[in-house]
Image (cartoon, rainbow, N blue to C red):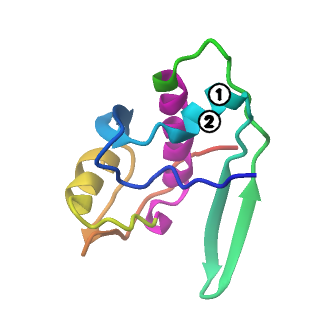
Amino acid sequence: SIALMIDQRVSEGKKIKFFDHEAYTTTIPAQLIKKFGCDVIPVHIERNKRYHFNIKFFEPISFDKNKSIMQVTLELNKILEKMILKNPDQWIWTHNVGLSDYCKSALTKVCEIKSVNGRCLKSSPVSAIN
């Protein structure tokens, strides 16, 4: 098993839509999917108390072998968007550069976001992954 955090800012990769904006996105997960035909199991972690978390493992997702690396990466970004929208203030983005602008421009379309010191702080409820 391999675990990958796909929401990390990368300076290399491909520009793929993420919240309707082109963002450099790693294609490594899609490359692994294409090469080995493996399924993806999305995982969502949410803090519910200071030291307590809920971890949800979703059903495995299989990708059509005819889909391109770009198409698979876009689908993965859409899954990630839904997870973030479930509770945007808990999205941890470890790269502060441009995060304030990112929150304002990308997430404001679907929920109220305030950004202070590169951290999304407030959101209104939005439906996400079931």
The residue identified by callout 2 is 32
x 46%, y 24%: residue: 70
* Near-viewer residue (4 or 19): 4
Q: Judge whether residue 36 is colored magenta.
A: no
Residue furthest out toward the front: 35
What amino acid is labelled 1 in the image? Lys
Image coordinates of residue 32 in percent, x first then y, are 62, 35
Q: Secondary structure at mark 1?
A: helix
Please provide percent x and percent y for residue 116: 25, 73
Instruction: Note whether 44 is above or below 90 in the view shown.
Output: above
Please report contact status of discs 2 and 1: CB closer than 8 Å, yes or no.
yes
- Furthest toward the bottom, the residue is 50
For the point 58% across and 16% down, which residue is it? 67
Few, some or many C-alpha atoms within 10 Å of disc 1 (few <14, some 14-19, many ≥20)?
Answer: few
Q: Is residue 48 above or below residue 110?
A: below
The quarter in which the C terminus is drawn is: top right
Asked whether 80 falls inside the magenta stretch, the response is yes
Q: Secondary structure at mark 2?
A: helix
Q: Is residue 38 left or right of residue 105?
A: right
Residue nearest the observer in this picture, 9 or 75: 9
In space, the residues marked 2 and 1 are separated at their CA atoms by 5 Å
Question: As shown in the figure, which amino acid type bears the numbered disc 2?
Answer: Leu
- Determine the image quadrant of residue 110: top left
Q: Main secondary structure of the magenta part?
A: helix
- The label on residue 123 is none
Q: Position of residue 6 (x, y in %)?
A: 51, 49
Q: Which residues are magenta?
A: 71-91
Provide the residue designation for mark 1. 35
Residue in the picture at 51% in, 25% down: 69
